Image: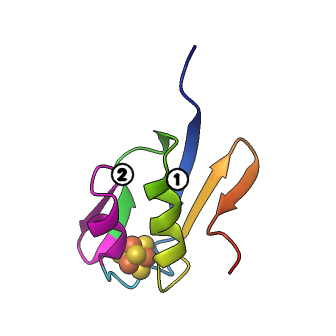
Amino acid sequence: MSAVNWTVRVDAGLCMGSGICAGTAPDVFVLEDDHARPRAERVAARERILEAADMCPAQAITVLDGATVIGPRPD
Ligand code: SF4
């Protein structure tokens, strides 16, 4: 049985470089030149990734399960 993989994207045009995502899930996001990027596009599913997407002040993070957007979650 394989783990569920999600797709993580950061819109560099929206990211304001707050670093919240990298602080919340440092194994998934890295801050480079004042912008975050995912360390890999496909990542093992876990709650911290959704938390990071929810906390991003620029709504720059998108998390997908297959073709379905699952993060950020609605308030
Ligand atoms: S939390 Fe959002 S705005 Fe802040 S570094 Fe991450 S993607 Fe960029």
Q: Residue at x 76, y 46 (%)?
A: 67
What's the image's color scheme? rainbow
Q: Which residues are magenta?
A: 19-35
Quadrant of the rendered image holding ligand 1: bottom left
- Residue 62 picture location, percent across and down: 59, 63
- Residue 22 picture location, percent across and down: 30, 65
Amino acid under disc 2 = Val
- Residue 44 picture location, percent across and down: 48, 37
Which residue, given by chain and number where applicable, does mark 2 sit on?
28
Q: Is residue 52 left or right of residue 66?
A: left
Looking at the image, residue 74 lies above or below residue 40? below
Q: Residue at x 76, y 51 (%)?
A: 68
Can you say which quadrant of the picture contains the N terminus? Answer: top right
Looking at the image, residue 37 lies above or below residue 55? above
Q: Is residue 36 left or right of residue 74?
A: left
Mark 1 lies on a secondary structure that is strand
Residue 48: mark in rendering: none
Residue 75: say if magenta: no
Can you say which quadrant of the picture contains the C terminus? Answer: bottom right
Amino acid under disc 1 = Val
Mark 1 vs 2: CB contact within 8 A? yes
Looking at the image, residue 63 lies above or below residue 12? above
Of residue 53 and residue 58, the one placed in the foreground of this image is 53
Mark 2 lies on a secondary structure that is loop
Which residue, given by chain and number where applicable, does mark 1 sit on?
8
- Mark 2 surroundings: few (<14), some (14-19) or many (≥20) residues within 10 A: many
Q: Earlier in the sequence, mark 1 or mark 2?
A: 1
